[in-house]
Image (cartoon, rainbow, N blue to C red):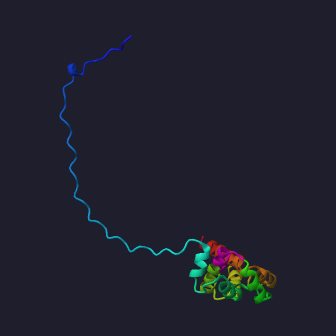
Amino acid sequence: MASKRTDKTKSTKQKQPPKKAPAKKAAAPKKEKAAPVKMGPRHPHGRVKETSQGSKEALAKALAPAIARSDEDKDALTARLKTASNAQLLRLQKIADQVKQKFGSREGLIEAIGKSEAKSKDKDFIAKLETLSIGNLFDLAVSAERRARA
């Protein structure tokens, strides 16, 4: 069965005139483009080469004194760091730079943690802090700063 079709020419509605487009606003002045941001290499191997040391071995040798504990041999630590991944070395370099900038040295970092925890006279606590790695110590210091701000 065929469906009903309506004749469009016999519609009862009156045709409306086409709508006009809204008036365009004045174009905003174009902003000047900022200077392009210089992007460094994305791969850790390239970032290691870009550092001031230039090679993985040189970076490991430069990091060893900064992250070594008082009872650790720096030459043995350098040998262990040479086998670490480039990403780990870069992370350790970033932490060592931040520790040097904020606290001066590993001992300054331990003193700051002792003061923030109100245990600067607790010899056992300080002795335990001296056994921790520089990454763990830095995390403790950052956590103590956040607690002090809150």
On the image, which quarter does residue 46 sit in?
Answer: bottom right
How far from the left and from the top, in percent, is residue 71?
A: 80, 88
* Residue drawn 41% across the image and 73% down it: 36
Name the one closer to the observer, 131 or 55. 55
Q: Which stretch is magenta?
A: 84-92
Please count the marks in the image.
Answer: 0
On the image, which quarter does residue 125 sit in?
Answer: bottom right
Above-or-below relation of 19 to 15: below
How far from the left and from the top, in percent, is residue 137?
A: 71, 78
* Residue 85 part of the magenta-drawn span: yes
Left or right, 20 with reference to 88: left
Q: Main SS of the magenta segment?
A: helix
Quarter of the C terminus within the rendering: bottom right
Left or right, 102 with reference to 17: right
| Residue extending farthest top | 1
How far from the left and from the top, in percent, is residue 123?
A: 80, 85
* Residue 9 part of the magenta-drawn span: no
Quarter of the N terminus within the rendering: top left
Name the one closer to the observer, 47 or 65. 47
Name the one closer to the observer, 121 or 84. 84
Above-or-below relation of 90 to 1: below
How far from the left and from the top, in percent, is residue 52?
A: 58, 86
Left or right, 149 with reference to 15: right
* Residue drawn 23% across the image and 55% down it: 25
Name the one closer to the observer, 119 or 58. 58
Above-or-below relation of 43 to 122: above
* Residue drawn 63% across the image and 83% down it: 55
